[in-house]
Amino acid sequence: MFGLFKKKSQKEKLEETYDKLIKESYKLSTVNRTASDAKAAEADAILKEIEKLDS
């Protein structure tokens, strides 16, 4: 209840975006491989940003 108004950190926002992109990439992999690869590349860039924040 006390975490109701807590703002998300930059890392949490990036992790949500990463998860969303990975799921979209998986869904597209059966229909359009090129679009799937593009989403995977975006997710990889987000992952690198997350790793920068960790170190």
Image (cartoon, rainbow, N blue to C red):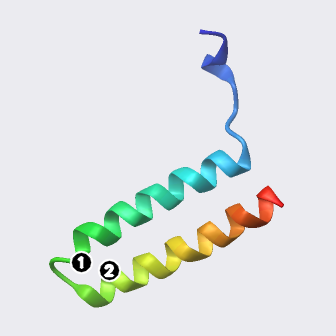
Residue 6 in which image quadrant: top right
Residue 36: mark in rendering: 2
Look at label 1 and name its amino acid. Answer: Ser
Give me the residue at 23% from left, 67% from top.
Answer: 27
Would you say 1 lies left or right of 52 here?
A: left
Furthest-front residue in this view: 55
Residue 45: mark in rendering: none
Secondary element at image label 1: loop
Looking at the picture, how far across and down is residue 32, in whole percent? 21, 84
Furthest-right residue in this view: 55
Secondary element at image label 2: helix
Would you say 28 lies left or right of 22 here?
A: left
The mark that comes first in sequence, 1 or 2, is 1
Q: Is residue 28 above or below residue 52?
A: below
Give me the residue at 52% from left, 50% from top.
Answer: 16
Neighbour tally class for label 1: few under 14, some 14-19, many 20 plus, Cα within 10 Å: some
